[in-house]
Image (cartoon, grey):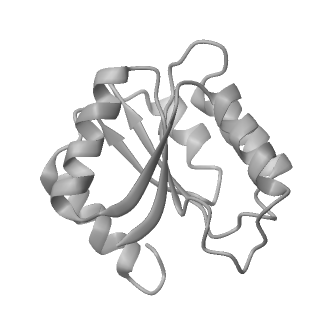
Amino acid sequence: MLNKILCVEDDQLLHLFLKKMVDKTDFADEIIDVYNGREALDYYRDLSGSVDEQSPDYPELIFLDLKMPVMGGLKFLDEFEKLFLDKFSRTNVVILTSYLVKQEREIAEQHPFVLDYLTKPLTFEKLNELKIKLSSPSGQ
């Protein structure tokens, strides 16, 4: 079970749905909700002053939508890598998208911390497969 997940998604219903799925599968203890990439960067900016790499008190996983207002997922990935990946190096990202766009997937997968690219809706089967992937020694 993971300690924390950050859900970066502009759809409030998806946040509720994801929380229920995570609770039912014992996937994580806590989910933090933000609604665009800018809010996610602000979250990490606030967190970076109080957490060090040895502390487990930051999200080990980010569920990231690509299409959001203010700042989308691809821009968030670039900024997170540049500003925070050194401090939060155990963080993995799972892209959640409504439809598969090959070019977006190729761009996202250039970031080594992107663990998976899943199309919505997230299912119990996909979540359990992800749980197995995260528990493997290599994380892949």
The spot of residue 100 in percent (x, y) is: 36, 29
Q: Residue at x 15, y 56 (%)?
A: 24
| 100 lies above or below 3 | above
Spot occupied by residue 14 in the image (x, y as percentages of width and height): 30, 29
Residue at 58% across, 31% down: 73
Up-down: is 138 above or below 93?
below
Task: Give the left or right position of residue 127, taking residue 133 as reference.
Answer: left
- Name the image quarter holding the N terminus: bottom left
Q: Residue at x 76, y 58 (%)?
A: 85
Which quadrant of the figure contains the C terminus?
A: bottom left
Q: In screen coordinates, is 75 left or right of 2?
A: right
Q: Which residue shows up at 61% across the image and 67% down it?
A: 57
Q: Image quarter for residue 45?
A: top right
Return the residue found at the far bottom. Answer: 137
Say left or right for 25 vs 112: left
Q: Position of residue 53 (x, y in %)?
A: 75, 74
Seen from this angle, which residue lies furthest front? 50
